[in-house]
């Protein structure tokens, strides 16, 4: 009788408990949802509105120089992209980064984001600094208009 009783004893269940994994995934999802909007460029500017066509997607991350309303320069790929830099530092950083990419066939795109309220001379100064630093072409970033233009 004792032999029969041992046969029907409980066996260990070999299932994986996925509830902790679901909890971790939900926490990670919330963290990414909160931090993603913070990863955009931190310099607050108002771009001019135009109806220009957008550029095709690039393989390389572009060098973006931002000129705020006060005329300060910011570089997207610098160590502190939210801190203004001088024209000399901007020229040095861009020259170093473009020379590092000189071995590749295609040069990194170089773009200027200028606030619509900034002095036009500051945007031109940024473009001149970029061309002196070795940029073959410099593009301007604009924002599409809020409403489509009326044809008439």
Image (tube, rainbow, N blue to C red):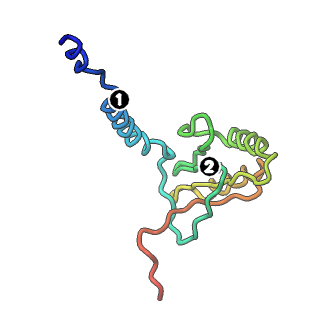
Up-down relation of residue 28 to residue 138 (above or below): above
Label annotation for residue 132: none
* Residue count near mark 2 (Cα–Cα under 10 Å), binned few <14, some 14–19, many ≥20: many
Q: Residue furthest bottom?
A: 152
Find residue 4 and report its horizontal and vertical position in percent.
21, 17
Residue in the foreground of this view, choosing between 93 and 36: 36
* Residue count near mark 1 (Cα–Cα under 10 Å), binned few <14, some 14–19, many ≥20: few
- Looking at the rendered image, the quarter that the N terminus falls into is top left
Find residue 59 and report its horizontal and vertical position in percent.
66, 53
Q: Residue at x 65, y 40 (%)?
A: 86
Q: Nearer the viewer, mark 1 or mark 2?
A: 1
Find residue 36 and report its horizontal and vertical position in percent.
44, 43
Q: Secondary structure at mark 2?
A: strand
Report the number of discs.
Answer: 2
Q: Secondary structure at mark 1?
A: loop
Location of residue 72 (image quadrant): top right
For mark 1, what is the residue?
A: 16
Find residue 57 and report its horizontal and vertical position in percent.
61, 59
Q: Is residue 10 left or right of residue 141?
A: left
Q: Residue furthest right?
A: 103
Q: Earlier in the sequence, mark 1 or mark 2?
A: 1
Q: Residue at x 20, y 15 (%)?
A: 5
Q: Residue at x 75, y 39 (%)?
A: 96
Q: Residue furthest top?
A: 2
For mark 2, what is the residue?
A: 65
Q: Residue furthest front?
A: 1
Residue in the foreground of this view, choosing between 136 and 48: 136
Q: Whole-Å distance between the Cαs marked 1 and 2?
A: 51 Å
Q: Residue at x 72, y 51 (%)?
A: 130
Q: Is residue 76 left or right of residue 88?
A: left
Mark 1 and mark 2 residues within 8 Å of each other at the beta carbon: no
């Amino acid at each position: 009788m004792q032999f029969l009783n041992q046969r029907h004893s409980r066996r260990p269940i070999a299932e994986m408990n996925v509830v902790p994994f679901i909890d971790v995934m939900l926490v990670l999802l919330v963290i990414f949802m909160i931090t993603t909007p913070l990863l955009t460029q931190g310099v607050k500017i108002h771009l001019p509105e135009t109806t220009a066509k957008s550029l095709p997607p690039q393989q390389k991350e572009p060098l973006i120089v931002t000129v705020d309303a006060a005329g300060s320069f910011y570089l997207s790929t610098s160590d502190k992209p939210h801190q203004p830099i001088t024209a000399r530092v901007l020229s040095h950083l861009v020259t170093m980064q473009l020379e590092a990419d000189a071995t590749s066939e295609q040069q990194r795109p170089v773009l200027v984001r200028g606030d619509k309220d900034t002095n036009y001379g500051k945007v031109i100064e940024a473009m001149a600094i970029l061309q002196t630093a070795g940029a073959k072409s410099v593009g301007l970033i604009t924002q599409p208009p809020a409403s489509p233009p009326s044809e008439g």
